[in-house]
Amino acid sequence: MASRSDFSSSQLSWKFWLLKACLAAISAAGLSYFKLDSIESWLYDTRVRLSPKTSVSTYFKLVLITNDTIKKNQIVPRISDLKNSLIKIIDSNPRTVLITFPPNDLEGTSAEKTDFAETFKNEKRVHFTRDELRPENDYESNPFPKPFDVLQVSYAPKTHDRKSFAQDGVTRRLILSYQGKTMLQKDLALDWNPSLADENQIRGLFDFYGANQVYVDFRPAQTYPSVDFNKIMSAPSADWENKIVIVGFDSQRKFDDYIMTPHSRDATYMNLPEMQANMIDTLIQGTWPVRYSEILNFILTFLISLITIHGVLVLRPLRGLMLLGGLMVGYTLWTWALYAAFRWWWPLSHQLLAVFLCYYFFIPYRLIIENRRSWEYYQKNQLLKQVEELKTNFISMMSHDLKTPIARIQGMLDMILKDATLLSHSQRDAVDTIKQSSNDLLKFINSILNYAKIESEGVELHKTSKDINQILEDVIKKHEFLAKIKKIQIKLHLEPLFPVLIDPDLVRQIFSNLIENAIKYSPDETSLQILSEEKEGLIWVHFKDQGPGIPEDELPHVFSKFFRSKNAKSSPIKGSGLGLYLAQYFTELHGGEIFVESTYGQGTTFTIKLPTS
């Protein structure tokens, strides 16, 4: 059953997530209000340039009037030249021929113009394209001047993002129909892709001022094969049966003959015949990019805002930056992969902006929180230092004050024991118990005093040249009585050693703590081996007992202050938990090292390494 604190913590967590979700929703709504078409289109163009290109259809042949054409003829081809070339092309039985410039752009006599108009006025395969859109009731009137007003006019407009969308003059869209009138590109593509007939079923279709449009899957310039106009004029055309032949200028005579595409913003990057080929081919293959709705844009902006806010407010600064960097790079690569694989145009500008704005908006709030926490931690640390100092002073004062009455008790006990008056057996046991208890209390007070000195950095080494083995023997003599009571045999294996510089009092306390622990926790009638040796330039002292051992999970903690194992706590043996802590501290104070090896149930070995100088 969940506790009340768990429920409260869970409730706070949900409230915090709800707050972050509300902030993310506000951020997404605010960002979605702003149209970022220029940035979004630039990012889209980058994806187009970096994505693999779709294959091109083999249905297209481009006939271009280039600068070389004009140089060889020394003049721009005349209307009669166009007539002769078109006749040769039609003889090859193409599916259709598109002329991307008005026939009145070419020079010719009145008779030549009239002859041209009469020749092609009933030729349904030849289409003279117009760029502009006209009202629905105005398509019947011919926009060409006489005598060209009898020619077949087809509307295949080019689009520019000049006053709408990205407003950069780049062509990205094609118009399928306008006010019920179908455009030429769709009419031609229907022969290969009948699914275009029902525009309501076209995925990615969008309406713009009454024009149903889709985006163009542009290939780079000069992708489609082209033929110079001169070759058509001077020799019979190749077999272009069932092809879409597109005739136009590529002579840089005027900017209207060219468009900018997502591949390049050079004003003369792609000529109109190539544009028409790209548009028609996009419809034939059904590869137009699909731009997703504003709803998806809002959802993605919300999710990325939520992740960003979570990273700023919750995660550590470095992890937060790594998360946001990975989020931006990962989402950018994801949108590129979707376009490269499926021609899906997922939004990117609002999402990247959400990362920047949420980060820079919420990071000051995070800094304020962190500064307040730092100040609180500082205040708490100062308070803890004061409490620790008071505690240390109190312990030191109390320990010193307790030593005086204990010394008096021990003095009175010595007097009683030296008195000639015989004590009864029960009185003798009582006196021995008091003496043992006072000794234990004195040891405990000395441990507390040493701990207080360590905490206040008051322990100093007073080194003199001493024999380690002699100190070991002295310490063992003081513990022989306790060992005899438990019938524990102490076995010495002491290698002759040279005197070394040590603090004898501290080293004596180290050995005393280890020997006393070994005797107290070892079963009766066991042995304690103490070995000393010099190797690797160090003095090694080993204390090996046959006690119960230390569990493996407790080994890392045996030298921690106030630590006692579970078995020791449950036993009648009393202790402060400071003996091994002090032994380690005093050993390391000498520049040495102490470590323990133990197998649970098979005894324990403590090893001390002390430097020889």
Image: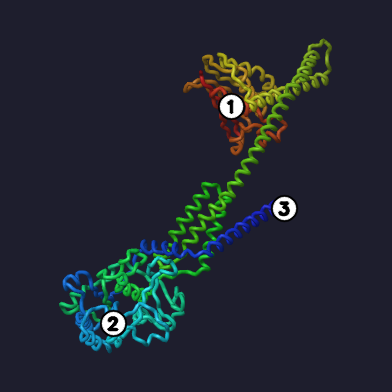
Residue 224's x, y, as percent? Answer: 28, 71
What mark, if any, has residue 544 been given in the picture?
1
Query: In the figure, is residue 600 to the left or right of 387?
Result: left
Q: Is residue 578 visible?
A: yes
Q: Is residue 526 visible?
A: no
Of the two numbered discs 1 and 3 in the rendering, the one whose residue sits closer to the viewer: 3
Q: Amino acid at mark 1?
A: Lys
Q: Amino acid at mark 3?
A: Arg
Mark with earlier residue (2, 3): 3
Cβ–Cβ under 8 Å for marks 1 and 2: no
**Quarter residue 216 falls in:** bottom left
Q: CA distance from mark 1 to mark 3?
A: 50 Å
Residue drawn at the location 28% of the way across and 76% of the way down: 60
Cβ–Cβ under 8 Å for marks 2 and 3: no
Mark with earlier residue (1, 2): 2
Q: Amino acid at mark 2?
A: Thr
Residue at mark 2: 96
Residue at mark 3: 4
> Are there few (<14), some (14-19), or many (20+) residues within 10 Å of tag 1?
many
Question: Is 16 rendered above or below residue 598?
Answer: below
Query: In the figure, is residue 145 to the left or right of 559?
Result: left
The kind of secondary structure element at disc 1 is strand
Residue 466's x, y, as percent? Answer: 57, 14
Q: Could you say which is closer to the camera, residue 385 or residue 150?
A: 150
Looking at the rendering, in which quadrant would you find the N terminus? Answer: bottom right
The kind of secondary structure element at disc 2 is strand
Of the two numbered discs 1 and 2 in the rendering, the one whose residue sits closer to the viewer: 2
Residue drawn at the location 22% of the way across and 85% of the way down: 110
